Amino acid sequence: MPEPVKKTVSAFAKKPKTQEAEEGSSVLFEAETEKPDAKVKWQCNSKDIATGDKYVITAAGNKHSLAIKAITKEDANVYAVIAGGSKVKFDLKVVSKPGAPVQAPADAPGKSDVEPAPPTDPAPPAAAPTGEQLVVPAQDAPPAEDAQPPDTRQDLTGLFTEKPTSGDVTVGENITFVAKVCAESLLKKPTIKWFKGKWMDLASKSGKHLQLKETYDRSTKVYTFEMQIIAAKANFAGAYRCEVASRDKFDSCNFDLAVHEACATEGFDIRTAFRRTGADGKEDSGELDFSTLLKKRAVQVNAEPDSDVWNILCSAPSSEYEKIAFENGITDLRGMLKRLKKMKKEEKKSAAFTKKLDPAYQVKKGHKIKLAIEVANQDVEVKWLKNGVDLHPTGSKYIFESVGNMRYLTINHCSLADDATYSCVVGEEKCTTELFVQEPPITIVKNLEDQMVMDGERVELMCEVSEEGANVKWEKDGVELTRDESFKYRFKKDGCKHVLIINEATKEDCGHYKVKTNGGESMAEILVQEKDLEVYQSIADLTVKAKDQAVFKCEVSDEKVRGTWYKNGVEVKPDARVNITHIGRNHKLTIDDVKPEDEGDYTFVPDGHAFNLSAKLNFLDVKIDFVPRQDPPKIHLDCMGRTADSTIVVVAGNKLRLDVPITGDPAPTVIWTKGEKASSVKPDGEETEGPASSWTLKHGEVVTEGDSRVHVETTKGHCIFTIEGAERQDEGLYSVVVRNPAGEDTADINVKVVDVPDPPQTPRVLSVGEESCVVQWDPPLFDGGQPIIGYVLERKKKKSYRWMRLNFDPYLDTTFEAKRMIEGMEYEMRVYAVNGIGMSRHSPASQPFVPVAPTSEPIGLCVDDISDTTISLKWRPPERIGSVELEGYGVEYCKEGTDEWIPAIQGLTDRTSLMIRDLTTGDKLQFRVRAFNMAGPSAASTLAQPVTIREIMQRPRIMIPRNLRQTLVKTVGETVNLMIKFQGKPRPKVIWSKDGEPLSPTFASVRNSEVDTILFIRKTERTHSGKYDLQVQIENVEDKANITLQVVDLPGAPEALKITDVWGFNVALEWKPPKDNGNCEITGYTIQKADKKTMEWFTVYEQYRRTNCVASDLIMGNEYVFRAFAINQVGLSLEPCNTTDSAYIQKTAMEYKPPSYKDHDFSQAPKFTHPLVNRSIIAGYSTTISCSVRGSPKPKVTWFKNKMDISNEAKYRMLSKQGVLTLEIRKPCTFDGGVYMCRAVNDSGEDIVECKLEVRSQVPKEEKKKED
């Protein structure tokens, strides 16, 4: 059996790295592949390169190199080396030679005219540059030869790979700010915005002084954004901001620009101002450029600063626009007019809106957003538009609200379809905003699974994401997969499922495959194994005559497999008589004109497979022997290179063929036996003890045959013994006896049958880790007759059906550590045994196990309390618990000076605190705590230093709760349960007393503990009121506190309620407070009256605080009695106090005067409750416009068209019903369009409402057909 091939993750064993080199030097990049015959390709900026004057590519075995000669600045590119499916990128950085002057040649007219600073000056002055400069970090000196230059850029976070940095510039000079964004991980092209200050968008300011550029490098996938300020002015200084966004990603960067005033240059040479614009560097090329001279002169002359061209345009007439643009160098006249129109619109103050929509809003997908505006007129009608289309309330999607002057549009459950432009229209005015719907990150719901397939099989890697239609990216070993020309990879989408399909997997497809989304990634491993070659037709033994043709033919399962033919161990070469062919799965060896020397054993060996097919070619020489003779039989084993006692090894399942050359005349009888020596075989007719098996041949015919699998045949000069599909029981001693009348000969052959071993015993999992486990197994009971050379292990997830091979080379030991498992996932293991013959069947699967690591150590272990014999410890749970539950904590202690840790308790505790008892006073102990889970104990958390078991003296202190520092009020019958905590060590003595007397157990119950005391009264009475004193005492040190308890009850009834006076409809009453106030203040009284006829009581006063009152509004002719209740914080007294006498209300004569009322004025000015609505209709179809009006008296209604009365025209019909006014226009034409007005008039006033009516002409049918 072929040994398993170990998979390699990458085709490279050594990868080239990024290097830095000086101009003019050479550089060498080296790479080393895993396979010596691997094809390697080198690239520069994704283009293939070959050996030439610039590049030298060499390859020696598995070592490959790329040399670049005479390096220049143009060689600073991204290079790559490709082998198989692996691609490695690296960079070449080119630096200038140290000490080289950085200045332009004298004869280069296109270069900057600034002289370089002297070498002694560490940095050039700030106002030195006069040409265009690029804002990059400054360096004072060239870096050391091996050191990297210092990076003074801002920290790169988010989307930026290079952020614009702050810079300064002289007035009139140019400056460029550069931002770079890497788009390798972006699903959409990034958009960038440049701002000055907080909100000024510079995109609309492009023109004479500002240019924005954008470039994209396909090789590095980097976008470069540039903002170039041309001829800077003093007002350009300030803070700037750059923002970049791509779908759900966003980043921004702030930078500053400082503008310096220009200084006059001494010794100015006017010749340097005359430049030509030619790019070829010749003196006479291009046109003369005097701009430098003009700028220099502008600095020397005190000229007035330029005025803002936009202010000039705003105040100038439109006929002067072209002239002003020419004078100020504005070439984009159309863009200038657009911006000017926008500026004028912005200057116009809105009359309809007091608060408009913001320029843009952003909301997450699935959330809701509320757009709000404020209008000047709260009665005005508001219309909402989406991309120019009216919005209408539809279910719960869009909700329109109107609250005062505020108008709201609520969009629920926002989706990508809601990413649009929204507008709010009020009359002729409109405000617009952009709504951006941010997609949530796409997460991977179902991860990829590892797969092991055979060579040529189809592979499907499937994952499931959180949202349909999401974009994903597939990678193999870090290289992105695309649909190449061979269509090797296919990508399939099915809802949330994404599938990567490899139609025919090969060994090159082995590797780690990764799928990426903007919210996560998943990785799986694919292993490809070669198929075992199957033999459909084996070659057969042939017996041919001289001059005949011999054809050996076999058929195998793989068409691509080639093979080699051997004769007696020597390779057969094709010649004039020998022809070797391979057609599909058939392999054929043809020998023409067979000769005696062609006789022998022929073997076919498939390339790359450890087995062979063999057959015998027998040459039949036909000749007539006229002289009869007798030769004794002879077995010629020596001529075949064997001894008389030989051992033949055969693999179980293969054919065992024993070809024994014999001689003798007449032809001898051949007897094959198994299980005894040939010498013990008796002649015919003589009995033996009976061997296990016997086969006899006489004259070439089988006389006896013991097994259907056994075939015995004889030819001239040979005796052949064949067993089809050898088994273990066929192993033993075989004897052959040849007899004829002239004598006999014997030989013994020992046959050994070897097989694959039995499966190993069931593996056992000894221990588990966070992502590993240690498994052990016992060797197989039978090794197959060959020594065990190793074991192969496989694992799978409990709920999966795919077994994953863990090692490809046989593992010698019987203990193996499996790694790279997922914590918390349930796994099973099984083992194969391997010997020289092949691999056994797999062992039974192990018991399921879960890889899990011990938790981290508990934290915050400290001493909570200590006494002479006990100690209390507390701690916090571990920071990392893992994927399985925590079983508990183990607490141990150790005496100082020893290493023996003693468990504090039997088993584990679930709590994060523990009191350890029965310790010896004065011992110095160290304590530790460990957390236990399925994987075992964690690291120990130990106290910083040992602790001496001895109680520490602590002064007593009483901690009175805040609510007990005031008087505690309870109602009679309620329960009092006061718990007061205190401190003190050793345990203090607690004493309760009331009003200086000790508390009796029958009066109140007291329970004391080490840290608190409880005062309990089951049912309070008035006698429990008073001051309670608490005293906590330790030896001669004590602390005191007191609590005031007030038990209140209902008050008694008021006293001496009497009637003091009666006049008109009034009665004066007077009484005295009750003797018993219920142990609290009387808060008021309730006075009630009752007619003596009905004796129904009605409340006159409630919560009345005085002790006298007047009852008024009594009924004439009735006789009344009165009663009073006392009230405190508990409630009313149980019994009232009644008057002893009654009060009679005398009847008096009265004259009724009916009230006078003023008539109500119901008149109301006309008011339109529903206005007319602008409409657009088609000519020829009758239409109506409606409105509603209210007013009293009923107003007179008049209709107008373009302010002309149309009441008497027959084309129009006016209807009025219940305040709804309708104007019907019969078959309107295009001339009926215009402004229609309805006026309502009555005595109280008038009101007007109007609308616009647009009449569109009909499209003739012929034109419609043409359009269709």
Image (cartoon, grey):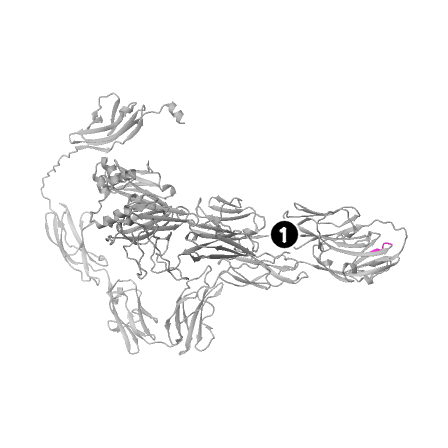
The region drawn magenta spans 666-670
| Residue 850 percent location from the top left of the image | 51, 59
The crowd level at tag 1 (other Cα within 10 Å; few <14, some 14-19, many 20+) is: few
Q: Is residue 166 magenta?
A: no
Instruction: Give the answer, above or below, for where 534 lies relative to 632.
Output: above
In-image side of 986 versus 300 (left or right):
right
Whether residue 404 is visible here, answered yes or no, is: no
User: Residue, x 73% and y 58% (percent of image)?
Assistant: 730
The verdict on residue 668 being magenta is yes
409 or 754: which is nearer to us?
Answer: 754
Q: Is residue 473 above or below residue 743?
A: above
Name the outermost residue toward the front.
284
Query: Looking at this view, is 206 or 704 the one in front?
Result: 206
Query: Which quadrant holds the C terminus?
Result: top left
User: Looking at the magenta stretch, what is its main secondary structure?
Assistant: loop
**Residue 1260 is drawn in which quadrant?**
top left
Residue assigned mark 1: 532
Residue 644 image position (x, y, % from top left): 78, 62
Q: Is residue 341 visible?
A: yes
**What amino acid is labelled 1 in the image?**
Asp
Q: Secondary structure at mark 1?
A: loop
Q: Quadrant of the N terminus?
A: bottom right
In the displayed image of the protein, which residue is found farthest to the top? 1210
| Numbered marks: total | 1
- Compared to 687, does 350 lie above or below? above
Q: Position of residue 904 (x, y in %)?
A: 45, 72
Q: Relative to residue 772, is residue 725 drawn left or right? A: right
